[in-house]
Image (cartoon, coloured by chain):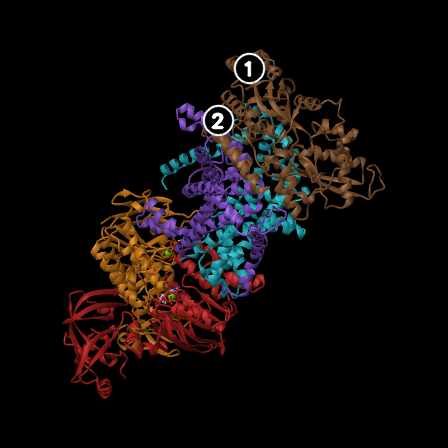
Chain colours: A purple, B cyan, C orange, D red, E brown
Amino acid sequence: MKNRSLSFWLFLTPTLVALALVVFIPAIMGIFYSFTNWDGLGYTEMLGFKNYITLFHNSGFLAALWFTVKFVIVTVILLNVIGLGLALLVTQKFKGSNLLRTVFFMPNLIGGLILGFIWQFIFTEAFDALGKAFHMAWLTGWLTDGKTGFWGLVIVTVWQMSGYIMIIYIAYLQNIPSEVIEAAEMDGASPWQRFVHITFPMIAPAFTVCMFLTLSNGFKIYDQNLSLTNGGPYKSTEMLAMNIVNTAYSENNFALAEAKALIFFLIVAAISLLQVYYNRKREVDL
Amino acid sequence: MKKTSRFFLGIFGLILGIIWIFPFYMILTNSFKTPKGIFASVLSLPTNGTTANYGNSFKALDFMNSLGHSLLITVISVLIIVFFSSMAAYALQRNKSKLSGALLMLFVSAMLIPFQTVMIPLTANFGHVHMLNMWGLMFMYLGFDASLSIFLYQGTMGSIPIAMDESAELEGANRFQIFFKIIFPMLTPITVTVGILNIIAIWNDYLLPSLVLPQNQYTIPLQMFFFFGEYTKQWHLALAGLTLSIIPVILFYIFAQRYIIKGVTDGAVK
Amino acid sequence: MAEIKLEHIYKRYPGNDTDSVTDFNLDIKDNEFIVFVGPSGCGKSTTLRMIAGLEDITKGDLKIDGEVMNNVHPKDRNIAMVFQNYALYPQMTVFDNMAFGLKIRKMPKDEIQKRVNNAAEILGLTEYLKRKPGALSGGQRQRVALGRAIVRDAKLFLLDEPLSNLDAKLRVQMRTQIAQLHQRLKTNMIYVTHDQVEAMTMADRIVIMNDGKVQQVGTPDDLYNKPTNKFVAGFMGSPSMNFFDAVLKDGRVSNGKGLDVAVPEGRLKVLRDKGYDGKKVTVGVRPEDIHTEQVALEAMSDAVVNAKVEVSEFLGTDSMLYSRTGDTEFVAQVNARDYHKPGEEVKMAFEMSKAHFFDDDTELTIE
Amino acid sequence: MAEIKLEHIYKRYPGNDTDSVTDFNLDIKDNEFIVFVGPSGCGKSTTLRMIAGLEDITKGDLKIDGEVMNNVHPKDRNIAMVFQNYALYPQMTVFDNMAFGLKIRKMPKDEIQKRVNNAAEILGLTEYLKRKPGALSGGQRQRVALGRAIVRDAKLFLLDEPLSNLDAKLRVQMRTQIAQLHQRLKTNMIYVTHDQVEAMTMADRIVIMNDGKVQQVGTPDDLYNKPTNKFVAGFMGSPSMNFFDAVLKDGRVSNGKGLDVAVPEGRLKVLRDKGYDGKKVTVGVRPEDIHTEQVALEAMSDAVVNAKVEVSEFLGTDSMLYSRTGDTEFVAQVNARDYHKPGEEVKMAFEMSKAHFFDDDTELTIE
Amino acid sequence: GKSNSSSSSDKKVKITIFQGKVESNKQFKQIAATYHKLHPNVTISVSSVGGGTDYSPVLKTRISSGNAPTIFSLAGPADVKQFASQEADLSNTKAAKAAQPGTLDAVKSNGKTVGLPFNVEGYGFVYNKTIFKKAGIDPTSLTTMSKLTAAVKKIDSQKSKLGIKGVFALPGKETWILSDHLANLYVGQEFGGNAQKMYKSKSMKFTANKEMKSMIDLQKKYSVGPVMQLDYSAQVNQNFSQGKVAMIQQGDWIYPTVEQIDKKFAQKDVGMIPIPVKGYENKMPVGTSLYWGVNKNKSQAEQTAAKNFLDWLYTSKQGKKLVVNKLHFVPAYKGYTGMKMPDALTQVVFKYSQQHKTIGWAFPAYTGTSWDPNTFQPNLQKYLSGKQSWNTTVKNSIKGWNEQQSSSN
Ligand SMILES: Nc1ncnc2c1ncn2[C@@H]1O[C@H](COP(=O)(O)OP(=O)(O)OP(=O)(O)O)[C@@H](O)[C@H]1O
Ligand SMILES: Nc1ncnc2c1ncn2[C@@H]1O[C@H](COP(=O)(O)OP(=O)(O)OP(=O)(O)O)[C@@H](O)[C@H]1O
Ligand SMILES: [Mg+2]
Ligand SMILES: [Mg+2]
């Protein structure tokens, strides 16, 4: 399809319009507000870069950024490995593989508060009980400090999101022509070699998508953070999104929050888009 | 595959499945407990179970009504999203120019904007044109969720040989016919995936509808949040409500899986 | 290097209500070159895929060197295969496509390099080694698929119409290369082709299939000269054998619609012994056994008909004369020198000593 | 129904550094049947795709009925095409695959039904109409692709190796069907094939390409008997022409390595007139012009060599004798009756009146 | 113009209420329906948001999208300041005039009253009557720190006999337990318990910090643990309501929760005493967490209808009954003498407030500022989890407050 053709634009226009009205125009307004003293209702003066200066002196932001980065690194790896692993598992032919798909996917159906409720009990009670039964001290006292809070968040996120990542991988796995896999079998490739050399390169687009999703979701994560630790104790598990939300809503500093959001956006965009750009280059069309 | 390895895979899957399902065990068992029973021991089975939570929750949620709104909003929004984003992805994938690369990046970058930062300007704008209702919400979902859908579609579209388009084109089909009659049916697995992901996102969404919907169009999650006051959280009702509200989605998911057909493009490649 | 036995093999694809392969039996001897031929859809690819292990065998046993292989994983069978539809790895370059099977086997880098380059040379792909399959022409892709197989030291090679998209010249070259490979590696090869020249020149034995069933197994010469039934006789040779439904009477066969020729002594005796005198038989005469040269007309004067050429095709060496005598149509293949224009009336001699006779009901050869 | 003109057409794929098609010129007359032949990768499919409008034309004009079509949308060209790689719609049944183009054109249901059923009948696909392409054999898929084209009333048919996966018998049938279709619809057809028999029998004119360039355009007979250059001479005919690098001296050509034969008067005069006496020339002799029959040996006694058969291939009608005289190798195609075993010493006569002579440098035919 | 609420000749008005107390939403709806029956020309629609979603951003989006409610709720001085351009003057309403002294301090803006309290709430140690009885301790006698400490030790020593896991359940996860409620007693002293005063103050000395430390230490030492794992529901639902601890630091708002868990227990076993603070013995911190505001950008008729409704709710005979019996609110208004609060905890609060034995709520002065979530709460939590000394905690808190106040006001 040529991009000078009418159909190209006919196909794109509806979504482009929606995107502009729903995301970009408000976002641009937000960027503008970040240079003011906007409080969510209106603004009385232009502050220039004051908010941007403030945010770098605001240790909360930097701490949250650092915590989030660590979280993102760990979850991106775990989610992709586990998500893809689950996808490979449930696309094998064995009894119950379809049921398993549903099971792995189900965590996505639970929203924030209930999620936190359930998992707090698992961490405080089930982990405690296990820890005592097997004399593993590290299983007790979860969520009481930054470290267990971190891993708690990781566990919940992985539990919840890997089914999501899984179904994306499944969709792409199923587009691989079976002949190509067969050819690799004839070439003597073991299942693992088949995966590394054939399957994985052929689902490279899925990898791009999932990397992007896990990256950006990792940075944007809020619900799990809110419901599980609410940033505590002593802000040790406060992530970026929560820091921004709190700045806006608890501290009523909407303009500063917008400034943080913009910086945050730039960081995430730089990483994620670079990743997409780099990965897309490796993909081939059939 | 050999029988034995199938068997061990099955066992392995079973163990993983149990780990995964454990929290649901908690949700389900606790939804049958009295409030006192829940907090006496969350992990145990209900000692003297009650189904009253379901009845009460059903009433408190105004279930039939809010289910109706949830269904209406979810179904229409997802149809809109699938329809338009698959088209957009097709345009972007089949056109390999700098412009479409840039447009794709634009869509992709939209996913990075934290919702909370656009929330106030967004609702303000829509409020001014009196679109704070179901229909406005559906349009907003297109804006928010199209990006991911396009991204997903765009990735799989590459595996559909361009010869499909060419062949249909020579048979006299125009772009829309090519897309809807030839390409779109071949995208079934990813369409199902896009559908599922959007359905759960919209079905469970709370914040956006809470800002947009008038009270007479409330969805299940909006009703459900009345179980959560600042201090009084009615877990027994909430868990029963959650169970009620995820049943339609799970049913859909199981149903949709059948449409993820193995290797639809097999015959196309030579 | 291996002996392969297919014993009573059946295949039915899930969802189909007939078998795609029925009671397939074959003993392949060590170092034998087997060719499968048969009409489209007769089950050639299916059989190959079962041998490769890519399709489950519905019934029957596949044995390699005496061992039942039905449940051995394809990758452990050490078989190289060229797929009818190529099945190239789209994300790999031509080089990597060919090198993949070797890398998997941990062959040293320079050895891989050598083999792939060598194969590319043979296949005329040297300048395309860095391209991806998407940017190749149909024939080039097919050659890559072939290259992927020939670089390997497999125990058994399965080649599913590996040359169908190549031009005549390249085909001949490739044919020679494959034959040499077979010589050098001393492996078994099973080769599917619809090209009779390929089948005839390459095969130690040909397996001819129809409708999922083996019709005949034999050397090219056997199949051509001693077909066991009408199907085989008609399938081998192009243009195919002329068949006439005739009655044997008084030492002649005639169909009452223009054909009436004498049957030579020896053949006649056999037919009479088997009780076909006065009965219906199907007579088969190959186009090249119908002659227009003066010598032939004289030599076979009791089998000459007056024919009219309706269409004539010029094929370089030969000419095809689509002709008619009375109401009977037939084709004669004559030397291009003996070209006749459409419409010409020509005398033609049927070389009945080379004719084939088939039972009218069973379609089996009478002998 | 149309006149198609290709004027100085070039094609370079993005990313390649050479042209895939160079300066392609061709006038296709109304109702003409054109066949493209040429080695794999020479640009046949590319040219077809440019005519169809699927590839941009890098340079040059494509005119249909006098109108420049370069920028006309494929769907508006009313062209039917059979793709080399089938390009079937995997989600549709065989019926729907064939019916799609008709539905798009809003043809009445029963008319569609009729046409598709009719095409399926011709193609032997009737019992597969309800299957999806994934459950068909290679040849069956190819037939569906063909069927998709023939149901339509296109102005121009482009067929890219449409029969390559079919067996000889079916090919002959299909060939006839396509020829009849051409007769009936009175449309233009461009047909790509690597099968010489197809090319020879079907074409009004053949376009022979090499390396992106047209080598010769002409009737089958022209190409076979009057090739303009060594490439054409070598490409047409299978097995291909024997070439000898020789010197013309004393009315004989000899290569000093075993070949030494007399050149007949007429040919000799031409060569001398063009100044080749005492110079190097390339001599081409087709395998079928080398004879072993006694008659021939006697008739062409000044062009007889003593040869040794090294390999002999039996092909049903004929035998190929891969032979050698002195250090010179060549192939002779003789009647199967004149079969000789490998190792036999045989006298062979070169029919030099049919030989071709080429300039050593330009490789053009000397005439 | 001025209209009498009972006159039916008025034009029809529709007003909307958007309020932040989601657990009372159903009751407010019923009250609105009742009011409509009595005043058919006034239609009131009530909505709320709940569950972890902050109220004020949603209110802001409503306002900025032209969808502002007529009546909304305000949570203290910070909100009063933020929504200043929406707030109508309520000084002349009957309800404002009937408000208890001090309850309007937080909602005075330029001398005008812009908010009306929902209710008053009070907190202290909510205790388990049975356990105290079994342990032989009279809870009302625990008026000083030393008496409390002794009693706690005594209870602790008979833990197994009493069938409890700890004396207290201190929810270390809920930052507000310490930073808002407990600190109010020791920080608020400096400002006489007046939120406005503190909100405007440039500095803070935290003189009573030592006393606060001993109170935290006491609760922590004798709490079921680990305290950092406890949250509100673990404290109230899981421990207190199941009789697993003797007392918890909480307020009258937990009653519905306790009742939900175990109605009998709630009716029989629950009592509340003030937290002993030197110099403020037997005084209960009573205050208002939410106020009603009326939108001044709405039509005059709507504003009047809104004010009439609020007046009716808090000052009419019918309204008062609903406030007490339906909403279970401890009234922040005069004129409720002789009415009986429906449950044990509100009764306590009502009693203390009627007797004016109260300490003001100063903490609304900082709950809407960044000092609270960013400085005070994390520092207290760090101390609580043993990661930081008390001195540092105090020093950081004071420093943070002074910095914030000097830069913003
Ligand atoms: N998409 C492409 N991108 C780059 N190069 C291409 C592409 N398609 C074909 N080519 C190259 O262009 C040349 C001509 O290709 P084309 O497909 O026209 O050959 P062909 O004559 O049809 O050959 P064959 O008989 O093998 O099908 C080849 O060298 C091929 O490698
Ligand atoms: N995956 C499949 N599912 C169902 N039926 C199939 C499948 N593959 C092949 N068949 C059917 O089995 C029969 C044999 O197919 P096979 O591919 O073995 O034929 P073939 O001899 O290779 O033919 P060709 O020469 O056309 O490639 C055909 O009728 C075909 O339709
Ligand atoms: Mg096949
Ligand atoms: Mg081609």
Q: Whereabouts is ligand 1, in terms of quadrant?
A: bottom left
Residue closer to the observer: B252 or C318: B252
Among the 4 quarters of the image, the one containing residue D57: bottom left
Residue corresponding to mark 1? E151
Q: Is residue C306 visible?
A: yes
Above or below: residue C71 compared with residue C37: above
Among the 4 quarters of the image, the one containing residue C250: bottom left
Q: Is residue A106 visible?
A: no
Q: Secondary structure at mark 1?
A: helix
Front position among marks 2 and 1: 1
Q: Chain of mark 1?
A: E
Left or right of D202, for residue E94: right
- Image quarter in which the C terminus of chain B is found: bottom left
Image coordinates of residue A166 in percent, x first then y, are: 45, 43
Left or right of C281, for residue D52: right
Residue closer to the observer: C177 or B235: B235
Image coordinates of residue D289 in percent, x first then y, are: 24, 75
Residue corresponding to mark 2? A125
Image coordinates of residue C334 in percent, x first then y, are: 31, 73
Residue closer to the observer: E99 or A228: E99
- Real-space Cα separation, disc 2 to disc 1, in angstroms: 30 Å
Categorize mark 1 by other alpha carbons within 10 Å: few (<14), some (14-19), many (20+): many
Q: Chain of mark 2?
A: A
Categorize mark 2 by other alpha carbons within 10 Å: few (<14), some (14-19), many (20+): some
Residue closer to the observer: A98 or A172: A172
